[in-house]
Image (spheres, rainbow, N blue to C red):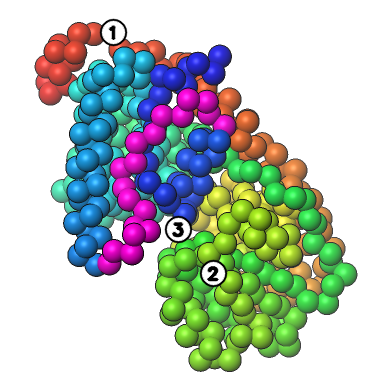
Amino acid sequence: MYKKFEEVLYIGPEKDYGGMGSVLDMYANYIPNFKFIASYPSFESGKKGWENKIYASLFFLQCLFHYTYVLIFDKKIKIVHIHSASNGSFIRKSILTHIGKILNKKVLLHIHSGNFKNYYNNAGLMQKYILYTLKKSDKVICLSNEWLEFYSSELGLKNVLVLPNPVESHQKSLPNYKKEKINLLFLGKVCKEKGIFDLIEFLEKNSWFQKKYIQLKIAGNGETEKLQRLIHKQNLSDEIEYVGWIKAEQKSKVIMDSDIYILPSYFEGVPISILECMSAGKPIIATNVGGVPSLVEANENGWLFEPGKFDQLNEIFDEIFSSKNLITKYGENSWKKAQQYKPEVIIQKLLSIYSEMAPLQTNVKEEIKNYFL
């Protein structure tokens, strides 16, 4: 059954610390004979500025040659599974998509970006090319029913389907609602779009935080110097702690030690960080954006508020401190809900998708001719 994976070539970033990288790492761990070509470098070499741009361009050029060579000479490959975000990532992956189609392969374009709607709406003349690429793909994967509505209704795609992100289970650690203080956790990229700076500004004014009943731990990469300057400038180091980028056992411990996970993003796909914390039995506070409502249900396993409407958190925190038993109740519900996102469950769904994607049988020269008609 799993020999089907020998027919699949995966494309994505060399090493990505976000959701796309987590998904690819999961695939690599669970899929036998995992065939992968990196399309974008990790920049762990320390290059900066223009050096990064040159290095990335040369890296992608090498990827193009390697990719084309493999598709021509590896006769087992019938399906190309391309993982993409927005902006430059999509442009690079669109080139690979069209090469794959020209070389008579089935192409599955997997969109991870939580900003794809904004990207498309602001693309101007590029909109036609973006839509052309999506329609040329044999299948387009999105991450939730909310995104399915966008791709099918707003863009008119008929080749789109939903495949949730998988998540490894962390040790179940339900919050203790009898504790006096509440430990919030933020995992992810430290940037304006994730709402973390606005969250800190809000907390400074919140009465529960001012009375030192709320503590916040932040883990991630991004604008970390700006974050640490803000924490130091506002004398918040006793209540807000930045622990850097964490993974593996350290991440599990940080999640276990938290009571509630909070993600105040302005846009999202289906956040891996939410899934990770749900799998450990944590309730969630998050914004009502992208695919988040498919994971977080109000009055079930967490609380939702509108992006940028941080005043709505006042009511949420009032409810939490007046009914702390909700923390444990919602945490248990989170854990139960996370079971449907186990890697083995998602991999089986992926296998079914591949099995339905019959390889093209037409002559390659004829396919190239028909492609441009």
Q: Badge 2 is on which residue?
A: 244
Q: Badge 1 is on which residue?
A: 361
Alpha carbon separation for disc pair 2 and 1: 51 Å
Q: Badge 3 is on which residue?
A: 267
115 to 73, vertically: above or below:
below
Are the residues flagged by discs 3 and 1 in contact, CB closer than 8 Å? no
Q: Please give left or right for residue 119 compared with residue 355 in the image.
A: left
Q: Which one is closest to the eye, mark 3 or mark 2?
A: 2
**Residue drawn 40% across and 24% down?**
8
Residue 163 rendering spot, x and y as whole percentages? 51, 34
**Residue drawn 46% across and 74% down?**
224
The secondary structure making up most of the magenta span is: loop
**Residue drawn 34% across and 59% down?**
45
Front-most of 303 and 113? 113
* Mark 3 residue type: Phe
Crowding around mark 1 (Cα neighbors within 10 Å: few <14, some 14 to 19, many 20+) is few
**Residue drawn 20% across and 23% down?**
102
Residue 183 rendering spot, x and y as whole percentages? 71, 71
Magenta region: which residues? 30-48
Quadrant where the image shows the N terminus = top right
- SS assignment at label 3: loop
Front-most of 286 and 52? 52
